[in-house]
Image (tube, rainbow, N blue to C red):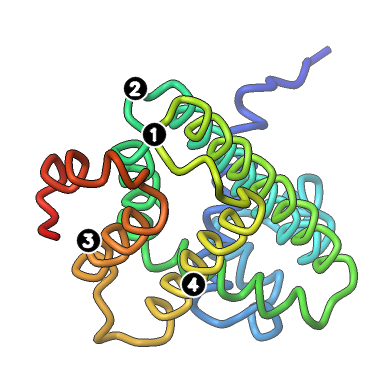
């Protein structure tokens, strides 16, 4: 009797999600068919449906993978010795280093969440978790004296996510927009908002920011 290989199943699921991301980024959720995804994944429909029974299940799988990726990113920031350097690395990874397909699929999910109740519920659950982790990260930085202690960390977390969403959306719709060129300016604004007044001079000098 053959036993399923968990690692092979996990790898195959990842390959299918990669193929679905490419199809969704290229054609959108509604125009991309399961047949298109099967062809992209080089898999028969019967085999694909064993892993994901519908496009909604594929979208849910992509969302869950993005959530796990975000959690891993925040864990790395929590272990970093310098908050602003860690935040810059986090922004670089999510806003600049991700592929065009990964950025486009996030825009598709955001748009679809306004039309599909189940996708909306899933998207909001992930957004709430990311916001809570961002707020907790800010609270720890405030306790260490790395950022101002008089800030409403929940409001700041929502603002930082809105900035990130805006940059990702702009990147997905505007070929002339350069997230890489814009990021240093955004980080300067965030630094000015968060840095303690008595430490601003030192932080600005360290980050090459002129007052």
Q: What whole-number distance in Å separates the C-alpha atoms at marks 1 and 2? A: 10 Å
Q: What whole-number distance in Å separates the C-alpha atoms at marks 1 and 4? A: 34 Å
Q: Are marks 2 and 4 in contact (CB under 8 Å)?
A: no
Residue at screen point 76% across, 73% down: 113
Quarter of the image that includes the C terminus: bottom left
Looking at the rendered structure, the secondary structure element under dot 4 is: helix
Label 4 neighbour load within 10 Å: few <14, some 14-19, many 20+: many
Residue at screen point 34% across, 22% down: 81
Ranked by sequence position, the earlier of labels 3 and 4 is 4
Mark 4 highlights which residue? 104
Query: Which residue is farthest top?
Result: 1
Residue at screen point 64% across, 32% down: 10
Q: Are marks 1 and 4 in contact (CB under 8 Å)?
A: no
Label 3 neighbour load within 10 Å: few <14, some 14-19, many 20+: some
Ranked by sequence position, the earlier of labels 1 and 2 is 2
Mark 3 highlights which residue? 184
Q: Tell whether 149 sits left or right of 202.
A: right
Q: What whole-number distance in Å separates the C-alpha atoms at marks 3 and 1? A: 19 Å
Viewer-nearest of discs 3 and 1: 1
Label 1 neighbour load within 10 Å: few <14, some 14-19, many 20+: many
Residue 9 position, x and y percent, is 67, 31
Looking at the rendered structure, the secondary structure element under dot 2 is: loop
Q: What whole-number distance in Å separates the C-alpha atoms at marks 3 and 2? A: 20 Å
Ranked by sequence position, the earlier of labels 1 and 4 is 4
Up/down of 97 relative to 2, above or below = below
Residue 38 position, x and y percent, is 63, 62
Q: What whole-number distance in Å separates the C-alpha atoms at marks 2 and 4? A: 32 Å
Mark 1 highlights which residue? 146
């Amino acid at each position: 009797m053959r036993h399923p290989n968990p690692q092979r199943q996990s790898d195959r699921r990842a390959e299918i999600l990669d193929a679905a991301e490419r199809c969704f980024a290229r054609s959108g959720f509604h125009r991309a068919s399961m047949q298109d995804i099967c062809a992209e994944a080089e898999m028969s429909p019967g085999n694909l449906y064993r892993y994901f029974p519908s496009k909604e299940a594929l979208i849910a799988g992509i969302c869950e993978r993005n959530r796990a990726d975000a959690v891993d990113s925040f864990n790395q920031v929590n272990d970093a010795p310098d908050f602003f350097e860690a935040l810059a690395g986090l922004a670089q990874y999510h806003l600049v280093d991700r592929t065009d397909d990964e950025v486009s699929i996030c825009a598709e999910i955001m748009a679809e969440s306004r039309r599909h109740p189940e996708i909306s519920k899933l998207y909001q659950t992930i957004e709430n978790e990311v916001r809570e982790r961002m707020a907790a990260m800010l609270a720890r930085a405030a306790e260490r004296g790395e950022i101002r202690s008089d800030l409403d960390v929940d409001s700041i977390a929502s603002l930082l996510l809105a900035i990130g969403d805006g940059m990702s959306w702009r990147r997905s719709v505007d070929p002339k927009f350069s997230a890489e060129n814009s990021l240093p300016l955004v980080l300067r604004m965030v630094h000015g908002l968060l840095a303690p007044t008595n430490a601003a001079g030192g932080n600005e000098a360290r980050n090459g920011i002129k007052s």
